[in-house]
Amino acid sequence: MIFLLLIYALIIIINVPQLIKRREWRELTAFFILYTIAFTLGLMYVLDIPIPSPMKALQHLIVDVLGIKYPQ
């Protein structure tokens, strides 16, 4: 787990100051959103927490929200 934290800290140290210096606020926001998702999934993997399947979310979106039924 410490290795995971070190790697993610190194990524922030390398990328964030350049984005702030160039005033790329949209890119910085997108970076932190994707970074948070990746860090959360990595942490769940390291701690042996089951990672939810994205297919269940897609199935819920297609069937329940959009109302599209699959032919049987």
Image (cartoon, grey):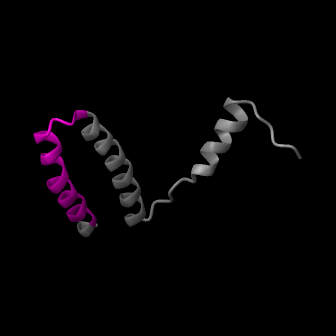
Image quarter where the N terminus lies is: bottom left
Q: Residue at x 63, y 47 (%)?
A: 56
User: Is 69 placed above or below 55 here?
Assistant: above
Give the vertical position of 26 relative to 50 (above or below).
Answer: above
Along the viewing direction, whichever of 67 and 40 lies nearer the viewer: 67
Residue 18 on the magenta segment: yes
Q: Residue 55 in the image: state x and y as whole percent.
A: 62, 50
Spot the residue most to the bottom: 3
Farthest residue in the right direction?
A: 72
Return the residue found at the far front: 22
Give residue 2's quadrant in the image. Answer: bottom left
**Most foreground residue, 4 or 25:** 25
Image coords of residue 25 (percent x, y): 22, 34
Q: Main secondary structure of the magenta part?
A: helix
Residue 64: horizontal and vertical position, in percent? 70, 33
Residue drawn at x 57%, y 50% as measured from the top left: 54
Judge from the rendering whether residue 46 lies leftward or rightward of residue 55; answer left or right: left
Does residue 12 appear to the left or right of 38 in the view shown? left
Residue stretch rendered in magenta on the structure: 4-25
In the image, 37 versus 26, the foreground residue is: 26
Residue 54 in magenta stretch: no
